[in-house]
Amino acid sequence: MKKENLDTLEPTLTKQFELPVLPYAHDDLEPYIDKKTMEIHHGKHHAGYINNLNKELEVLNNVPPSVEDIIKNVSKYPVAVRNNAGGHYNHSMFWKLMKKNGGGQPTGKLSEAINSSFSSLENFKNRFNEAALKHFGSGWAWLVIKNGKLEIGTTPNQDNPLMDVSAFRGTPILCLDVWEHAYYLKYQNKRADYINGWWNIINWEQVAKNFQNAK
């Protein structure tokens, strides 16, 4: 009987979550978000959340297969799962909400809903900007559907409105990362400039898809 060479055998590890591929190149969002920030933000920060989340889940039993199911019942898990699952979910949504040559205006049902809830797109953007700018410390600004209506709010750290521990609840359709690592290389402490620039790369088509799915 042939003897196996155990030195050549490696354990097979199943990683529950993997870093999603960006739907654009690192420099496609310039000049509003620079290439170096995208490389670090996606390749280091987001990847770090995923690696840490997978490590945490290795020792837990009966973990659901989707990150959405984890965060909806995140109070059942350790704080490290809350932080890293939130980081993975939030960033995965955030990347899709931007695109090269984005901006412009929403159309169709999404435009109607924004006008109905906030009177106009301009008023919506002003209120969203204010929420994002005034959020203290690290966190996220959100547009959600709640009880059939659109609402604006923020969450701290890597929390999000789907979490059962969140003070601001709803189904997210739009989010903006206001952690300093999202903008500091280019904008330093000028969060307002980062927020204003971001509207030029927003992917309204993806927001509309999120809106339709949330309904």
Image (spheres, rainbow, N blue to C red):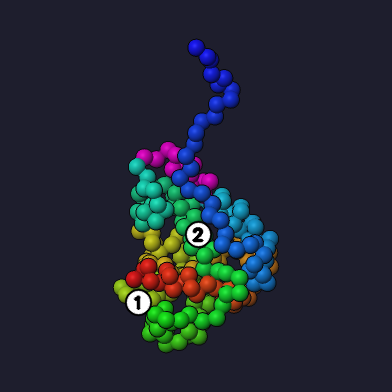
- Rounded to the nearest whole Å, what is the CA distance between mark 2 and mark 1? 24 Å
Residue 165, visible in the rendered structure? no
* Magenta segment: 50-61
Amino acid type assigned to the residue bearing label 2 in the image: Ser
Above or below 159: residue 111: below
Return the disc, 2 or 1, that comes first in the chain's sequence: 2
Above or below 197: residue 89: above
Q: Where is residue 134 in the image (x, y as percent from the top left)?
A: 53, 73
Q: Residue 46 carries which label?
A: none
Residue at image position (38%, 76%) is: 150
SS category of the residue bearing label 1: strand
Amino acid type assigned to the residue bearing label 1 in the image: Lys
How packed mark 2 is, by other alpha carbons closer than 10 Å (few <14, some 14-19, many 20 or more), is: some
Q: How many labels does the image show?
A: 2
Q: Which residue is identified by label 2?
A: 92
Residue at image position (61%, 53%) is: 43
Instruction: Indicate left or right for 14 with 117 as reference.
Output: right
Quadrant (top left/top right/bottom left/bottom right) for the C terminus = bottom left
Q: Which residue is identified by label 1?
A: 149
Above or below 132: residue 92: above
Residue 16, visible in the rendered structure? yes
Nearest to the observer: residue 73 or residue 32: 32
Q: Position of residue 28 (x, y in %)?
A: 64, 67
Tags 2 and 1 in contact by the CB under 8 Å rule? no
Q: Does the magenta stretch include residue 66?
A: no
* Residue farthest toward the front in the current orientation of the protein: 1
